[in-house]
Amino acid sequence: MTSAPAIGFEYRPSRWLRRILVVVAALAMLAVALSALPVWLQPLLALLVLLATWRTLRRLAGGPVVAAGWSAGHAWTLHLRDHADVPATLASFRVLGAFVLLRLQTAERGVQVLLLAPDNSDADIRRRLRMRLATVQPGEALPRL
């Protein structure tokens, strides 16, 4: 049996995820406005929702990973924004239809989460990843998310 070829891809955060986050934040703001909370507490909660949304959007946009690669020997490498290549191990993964969620553990940067969606990755890359992830044995990676 021949080994699987290496898989490499460029990574950028999903625009869909950011848009969904903004919609959920708007719904949370609406829920606060329509709630029976005291009038003085509503602006405070609305401000908390705005700050949490802003913080999350900044964290999504400022991720250090710009590319990733999975060699034939199950070794992961992350290419960072500062042009450093960092070895990583697959901590866990989840395949949800057309979406692939990867949690990669690095010694220097901790856990890096990559969401591959139709808007930020090629369909062929996601298909190849799904096929190869299906062959990962339980001892090779931590349990799925």
Image (tube, helix red, strand yellow):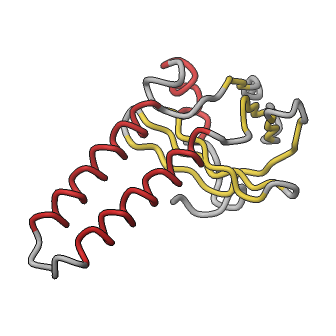
**Left or right: where 136 falls relative to 50:** right
Residue, x 15% and y 63% (percent of image)? 33
**Left or right: where 11 falls relative to 131:** right
Of 139 and 42, which appears nearest the observer?
A: 42
**Left or right: where 66 falls relative to 93:** right
Location of the N terminus (image quadrant): top right
**Left or right: where 134 falls relative to 109:** left
Farthest residue toward the front?
Answer: 40
Of 32 and 15, which appears nearest the observer?
A: 32
Where is residue 109? Give x, y as percent: 81, 54
Residue, x 33% and y 72% (percent of image)? 44
Where is residue 141? Give x, y as percent: 68, 57
Residue, x 64% and y 47% (percent of image)? 136
The quarter holding residue 105 reads bottom right
Where is residue 88? Give x, y as percent: 81, 48
The quarter holding residue 12 reads top right
Total marks in image: 0
Farthest residue toward the right?
Answer: 84
Of 43 and 10, which appears nearest the observer?
A: 43
Q: Is residue 92 above or below residue 20?
A: below
Residue, x 24% and y 59% (percent of image)? 28
Q: Is residue 113 above or below residue 17?
A: below
Of 137 and 32, which appears nearest the observer?
A: 32
Where is residue 23? Give x, y as percent: 27, 44
